[in-house]
Amino acid sequence: MRHQLFIDGRFVDAASGQTLPTLNPHDGSTLADVAMAGTEDIDRAVLAAQRAFPAWSRMAAADRGRILLKLADLIESRADDLARLESLDTGHPLRDSRTLDVPRTAACFRYFGGMADKFQGETIPVEAGFLNYTLREPVGVVGQVVPWNFPLMFTSWKMAPALAAGNTVVMKPAEITPLSALAIAELMAEAGLPEGVVNIVPGLGTVAGQHLAEHPGVAKLAFTGSTATGRRVVQASAGNLKKLQLELGGKGANIVFADADLAAAVNGSAWAIFHNQGQACIAGSRLVLHERIAEEFLDRFLALARSIRVGNPLAAATEMGPLTSAAHRDKVLGYVDIAREQGGELLSGGKPPADAALAQGFYVEPTVMRARSAADRIAQEEVFGPFVTVLVFKDDAEALAIANGTDYGLGAGLWTRDLARAHRFAREMKSGMVWVNSYKRVNPGSPFGGVGQSGYGREMGFDAMREYTQVKSVWVNVDAQIPAWYAR
Ligand code: NAD
């Protein structure tokens, strides 16, 4: 299979003719060769988006919305194919791709399709004689850089609000998972999206991504990826002072108090870390347990972790698939040694599964390690795999100190029956999102994003529309008598 770039409404080869293979993480085989955008292709895509901007931004908002609603319907009508493609390219278990990724992608386009004509400016009660109102105007050409962990879903999270607000888009998917974004491109014309409004240009981050971040024709860059790359993007964007939105890494604390419903907490904590093989920025990767229930909790949690069915993502029974790349698997497994050197204790997993049928794939068993201290590397650094770090606390103050004791601040959870404590922690936790007696809920209406080294800006909801617009204040003299500046 061969795939091309999507520029100005057409599928085209890269100017250099170069391609990159994308692999099936289940067995390491090549799924497809994908055109690799270079700087010239990014320039072409930005130009196409610039040309498309005037008409798209002036189109009635309801008409833009209608196109996004149609796209949502089309995604649903191709749900089986899209889910399979996402599972092949990323390793997501098919049942997750089918029940979560694809429906959430459609829901996001639908939400922002409905939003397009409901996001509005304000009138401001200024001094007598003046009408003052605000316009929410699109920013222009928006560059979007997406990681490999939820490529389909993130395509919608980034594209839908940008388009609803009247921007045009140049999107660079991650080099190792470009297929689902290109599949969405195939639906664009059918949905009625004019040529050039969306351009999808897979390529290397250090070449295509970097050029997009530097590009003077790009007014805003929305980036999701690691904190280290986020910093590079900030520097690259300085030339034309791009508006920036950064969704970066995380090290989610998931606190279980002694009064929690343990069955629910065990189950929810497993979901928090093992869903999508732990490759989630909001993963509950630090399991913070009250000392009174720690051993009982761990007995149950380890039994659950060991029972997770790891296997071919396309098999109906599979609950955890492979990691998305071999390099990433090696990085995750490397943390077992890093932890041991610091006195960490391996409680479960820590290696590829024994099953010979999985030997060519990028698999890692669900892994649970107890850290010696909250300062250890496995308690501080984002592992981004099916790897959870266990920490134990004595009282609320210590739990909060552990939870807030990293540079990140994206997602956090807590399990308790004490209502006052739940609200107190929700207020005190240094985190963009907090889940109480639950973990990792997302919805197109609810703001998503982080604080600290997890980035800034918000996806989803009205906040996303604010991110993708700039506000203009208009003053109209209705009947104000303005005295002469100088009496003459
Ligand atoms: P990454 O930073 O390596 O890559 C992300 C994207 O940036 C890719 O498309 C890559 O090609 C591109 N890129 C790389 N170098 C670039 C450069 N110099 N200029 C511009 N673009 C460049 O991250 P990853 O390994 O693909 O993704 C995993 C990371 O993403 C984790 O840290 C995870 O927490 C984070 N993430 C954050 C969120 C969130 O919403 N906060 C969501 C998902 C993933």
Image (cartoon, grey):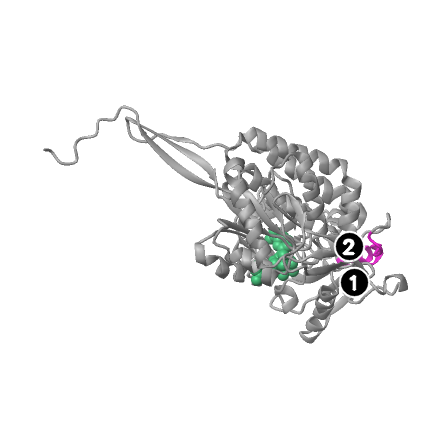
Q: Tell me whether the residue at label 1 lies in contact with that at label 2, contact meaning CB atoms closer than 8 angstroms.
A: yes
Q: Is residue 307 magenta?
A: yes
State the residue at coordinates (65%, 46%): 155
Magenta segment's dominant SS is: helix
Provide the residue span drawn in magenta.
Answer: 298-313
Q: Quadrant of residue 299?
A: bottom right
Kindly tell me whether mark 2's CB lies below 8 Å from ligand 1: no
The residue pinned by badge 1 equals: 362
Image coordinates of residue 201 in percent, x first then y, are 63, 52
Q: Quadrant of the C terminus?
A: top left
Q: Which mark is residue 91?
A: 2
Q: Is residue 403 magenta?
A: no
Ligand 1 sits in quadrant: bottom right
Q: Amino acid at mark 2?
A: Gly
In the image, taking residue 455 as reference, residue 200 lies left or right, namely right
Q: Which mark is residue 239?
A: none
State the residue at coordinates (22%, 26%): 481
State the residue at coordinates (46%, 36%): 136
Disc 1 secondary structure class: loop
